[in-house]
Amino acid sequence: MDNIIIKSSGILLHIGCGLTAPKYWLNIDTSLTLKISKIPILGNQLITLIRAPKWPKNIYHGDIVKGLKIDHNQCDIIYASHVLEHLSLSDFNIAMSNIYSYLKPGGIFRAVVPDLEQHIAIYIKQRSDSTLSENAAHHFMETSWLGHKGKRSSVYDRLQEAFSNSRHQWMWDEASFKNAFAQHGFKNIRKCNYGDWSDERFSDVESEDRLSNAICIEGTK
């Protein structure tokens, strides 16, 4: 993780923030272009050269799987939207353990992931429609981000795929995601809708469009 000064308690941790970086939150992301942007003197020039987005200064490079420079029991709340599905099951379990350890007792973790059940329901509906059936599987693989349409014929292609990490590694439905929370020690586990935040500060980081064809789960330490 980047070398930053972290206050000792009351941290609002935003994992996999992308370009959403509200004030008062510790916003982290694993993007390679973010890491490049932090290179002294040359960073911004390289970002312009490769036509990557300009990262806000209050976003830091950090990997929840590798662990962050945060002591245990320091976070009030933690948020992750469309992040955990990009992890293998093994890495997911490491991430969940780290998240739980960073939360204060009574702290809340809120996470959004694509809903496998909804994607399957759409596939089944299209599969039973004679006008849509021939493209149903293609549509499922594309919208679920489980498939890969690009080339892998060169080292560049493989590196680009590895660095982008755009494909989904493990999908969840409501039952399995709730169970994962429980397995990692969370209590008061519930399915959420947009706007029903247990802590109003989640409104800083959550947008309604991110809950489309997705499930949102909250759990308390």
Image (cartoon, rainbow, N blue to C red):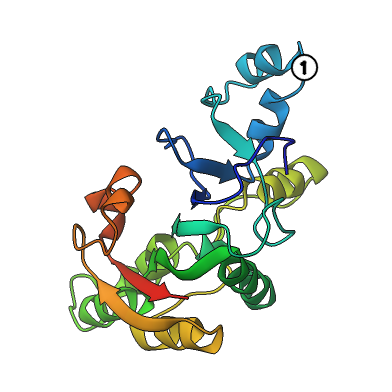
Q: Is 120 on the left or on the right of 179, as rendered? A: left
Q: Nearer the viewer, residue 153 or 160?
A: 160
Q: Is residue 20 above or below residue 197?
A: above
| Residue 53 visible within the image | yes
Q: Is residue 62 above or below residue 143?
A: above
- How far across and how far down the image is residue 147, in percent? 53, 64
- How far across and how far down the image is residue 111, in percent? 41, 65
| Residue 147 visible within the image | no
Which residue occupies 55% across, 52% down? 166
Q: Nearer the viewer, residue 56 or 152?
A: 56
Q: Is 95 on the left or on the right of 55, as rendered? A: right
Q: Is 183 on the left or on the right of 143, as rendered? A: right
* Callout 1 secondary element: loop
Query: Could you say which quadrant of the image residue 213 lies in?
Result: bottom left
Q: Is residue 123 above or below residue 110?
A: below
Q: Is 110 on the left or on the right of 70, as rendered? A: left
- How far across and how far down the image is residue 127, in percent? 27, 80
Amino acid identity at mark 1: Pro
Count of numbered labels shown in the rendering: 1
- For mark 1, what is the residue? 40
Category of crowding for the residue at label 1, using alpha-carbon neighbours closer than 10 angstroms: few (below 14), some (14–19), many (at least 20): few
Which residue occupies 71% across, 52% down? 152
- How far across and how far down the image is residue 172, in percent? 44, 78
Residue farthest right in this picture? 155
Which residue occupies 61% across, 15% down? 48
Residue farthest front in this picture? 8
Question: Can you say which quadrant of the picture contains the N terminus?
Answer: top right
Which residue occupies 26% across, 53% down? 200
